[in-house]
Every structure is written in structure tokens, then in C-alpha cells.
Image (spheres, rainbow, N blue to C red):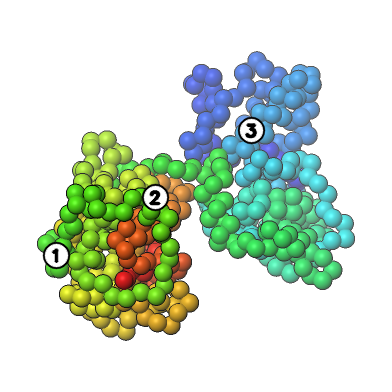
Amino acid sequence: MSGGMLVALRDRTAVDLGASPPVLERAGIRLPMPALAAPEAGPLARVLAAPTDAVTLSELAAEGGPVALARWMTWSRRAMRFGLLAYRLVDEHGELIAEFVPTAAGAPDLADPAPLPSASLLLLSRFALLHRGDGALTLESPQGTLRAELSGVAAAVVAAFMVPRTGAAASIPGMNADTAETLVAALYAGGLLVTVDDDGRAAEDDDPVLSQWELPDLLLHARSRYAVADRPRGGTFRFVGIRPAPAALAFDFGVPAIPLPRPDLDLLAREDPPFAAVMEARASRRSLGPIDAARLGEFLYRSVRVRRAFDAGDDPRDYPMTVRPHPAGGGMHELTTYLVIGECADIERGFYRYDPVGHGLDPVAPWGPRVHTLLGDAGKATGSDIVPPLAVILAADFRRLSWKYEGIAYPTILKNVGVVYATMQLVATAMGLGSCPLGGGDSELFALAAGTRAIEHTSVGEFLLGA
């Protein structure tokens, strides 16, 4: 068997001939196959029998005329985009070197990729991510247009581009020069390798926009916003039947250890400043004084209490829900509110968890070095060394979102944090209090102080509150 780039049916792609019309199916994606009598059905039958080079497939389709060829090219590219077909690079012995799956509409045609820049040095993109994927070493980039599933020898070639080198210098023992060049050309065409200038600077670092992106930010953006067919996104409920639906509240609250005063909402509805006035007065304040338990209780009641709770229904996709003053993605309300209190009249300093049903505080940890550091870090997040009197910390129950959502669970948490920030700041403004949403905190320190597992339940937002 001669080596080269072949078109192949991806592993675990099913052929459903019983459907009308027959379809290819993988990971919930279904694509109708060409009619059996259509000329473009010939190339597909060849691919279903064995991986085949694209030239042979085009020649088979062209036997039906130019329209048949165009229809085959359109259908096969769609099947590639849907993750049903892929390009496979094999060596002269037929051994798989790499498989390439398109991840963007602009993915290159690897049957005829652009030639490598002859004299240019190439370097692994700083956005390239190598990880254990679906049974293979996977190389991908949020900036790229192809995902590469690599054999061990192909991974060694990729590793060689940790330093700039030409494509011709990529050959390693166990891979002939032609196969190595084809591999490098595909990696370059898919945006996984980038060119380097004579000073050793990558072209992507000279881009005035791209140079300001960091890998974690761009990866999160791409995964949650760009559609990749074989990566489901949204409310897929992938853990239904595998894990039980998560509880509406991350903790079983009993009678609050410290009951908080409840405000008179009817009175507030009459006497609060108008909404337009609150919006115009809203501003972040970083220099804050202490408040008392009554003011704290009113603030929490108006912003994050549970108004109503609902049990899950009989549908396997149902889950227990709560209704609160602010909205949340899917009505899941995965956030738990904590208070780090350094100074608050009628409440001892310490670390507390807010009970949104019973409207009170439960002690989490007494005042000590960790709790003091949590509060001090909140002050430092504003650029000040002054320890604030009180900080609100929002912690997420990650399992609750990921049970329902795929690909967007963490971005949804961050959006929910923003919604709570806005709600809290408007409530604080209406109450005549000062507040300041913060841009960062120490999730590991929070987990240590709260006694939680950081990948299960930890801080995702901080907020200063005071007089």
C-alpha cells in the first residue's frame, strides 16, 4: 500500500441503511447519504469499503460528469465538516500517522494543500494544545481550522517544532521524508504550525489583535462560541442516566445559626428610589465602612434569597430548581453566597455561608489566617492594602451546570456571576450602600478555608459591600 493522504470514514461512524434516506451517524450527527443510483454514490461506496485517496474518489465521481463531481465534492466536504469523514495520513506500510478533522468552515482541502513556504522557518503555534483526546494524542488550536489526532511518531514530529525549523528538517527515524513533509504541510495548513521571521518571532505574535490573546481565554471563547459538529454544545444532558440530577442547593441547610432580619418588601416598593435613579447612581466604591446585621440581611434578602423551590418532575431531564431575585442560565442557580466578615455590628468576624431559604448565616470557619487572607486579598483586588470590613464570595457547584450543559458550562457560570454582580450592585445602590465587584480571587485558598474540593465547589466571584 502506498502512503499518502486518504479520505476515510471516522471511527464509530455508523451507516444506517434502514433510514429513509440512508444516513451516516456519529455522536448524534446524522447526514443523508447520496442516493444509491446517483453517480456520487460511487465514491462514497469506495470510502465505506476502505480509506481511499481523494484523487481516485474525484475520478470516480467525474465519471458521472461535472455535476456529479461537484455534488460529490460538496457532500464530502459537508461530511468532513460534520465529523463523519476525515483525512488520514498513512505511511508507505499503511500505518496510520495522523487523522485530520476540520474544526472551522475555512478548513483546508488536504487533498491539495497549499505548499510549504520553501525557505521559511516553522514553529508550533503558541495556541496549540496537545492532550489525550478520544483514544489518541490530539493537537488542536482555537485559532486553527483542523484538529490532528496523532500517532506517537507524528507527535515526535510536532515536538520537533518547539524550536523553529524548516519543514524539510522535520523527518525523524521511523518516518520517511515524503510522509513527514505531508504531515508538516497539513499541520501548517490547519494553523497548528506558524511561520517565523529571521529574528525568531512568530507571525501570530506580530498580529496586533492576536498578540493580545492568551491561550486559556481564546480556548474558552472558541469552545463555547464556535460550532464544531462532533463536539456537542448546549443543553445536551449527557449525564442523564449516569449521574443523578444535582440538588437545587449545594448544601443541606437546617435552621440558620444566625437568623438575619427580613426587610418589608411592600414598604421598600413604596419608598425605594426610582429604578432610573438607581441605574444612574450606580458606581463602584472601593473605600467602604462597616454595616450592621440588619443592613446585611436586607441586602442578601433582596439579591440572592430563594423565593420558591420546585422538585424535579418525572422526565429524566428534569432537575430541582429555585427561583431567586436574579435570573440564571437554565434556572439552575448553581451559586452559593459566602460572607467573609471582618467587621459587622451584631455578627462576629469569621467566614459564613448564606442560607438562601432560611435567610441566615451558618459559620464555615472562625477568624484565622486563611479567613483574614481571603478578606485581605479582596482589598488588594481593588489596588488597596486596606483590609475591607466585609466581602461577599460567590462559589459555584460545578456539577450542577455540567450535568446539563456541554461545552458552555463554565462560561455560563461566569455569565451568572455577572448577573449576580449587577443585581447586588443595584440593590446596594438602592439601599445607599457602597459596593465593588472584583475581578479575581484565590479559588484554592477559598476551598481550603471552606473545606471543599476545588474542582467541585469553589469561588468564582468576589464583591465588596459596605457603608
Q: Which residue is mark 2?
A: 276
Structural crowding at the residue carrying mark 1, measured as other residues with C-alpha within 10 Å and reported as few (<14), some (14–19) or many (≥20): some
Callout 2: few (<14), some (14-19), or many (20+) C-alpha neighbours within 10 Å?
A: few
Q: Nearer the viewer, mark 2 or mark 3?
A: 2
> How many angstroms separate mark 2 from mark 3 (CA)?
51 Å
Indicate the secondary structure of the residue bearing disc 3: helix
How many other residues sit within 10 Å of disc 3, few (<14), some (14-19) or many (≥20)? Answer: some
Q: Residue 239 placed where, x, y %?
A: 36, 46
Please give the residue where the numbered disc 1 appears in the rendered image: 259
Left or right placement of residue 162 versus residue 246 in this view? right
Residue 122 appears anywhere in the view: no
Quadrant in which the N terminus appears: top right
Residue 250, image x, y percentages: 26, 58
- Does 371 sit above or below residue 270? below
What residue is drawn where x is 65% and y is 53%? 143
Residue 78 numbered mark, or none: 3
Residue sitting at x 23%, y 66%:
295
Q: Pick whichever, 246 or 132, lies toward us.
A: 246
The reply, left or right, for residue 422 in relation to residue 163 is: left
Measured in 3D between alpha carbons, the distance from the residue under mark 1 to the one under mark 2, in whole angstroms, is: 33 Å
Which amino acid, mark 1?
Answer: Pro
Quarter of the picture containing the C terminus is bottom left
Q: Give me the residue at 28% from left, 78% from top.
A: 342
> Is 215 left or right of 403, judged from the image as shown?
right
Which quadrant holds residue 461?
bottom left
Dot 2 and dot 3 residues touching (CB under 8 Å): no
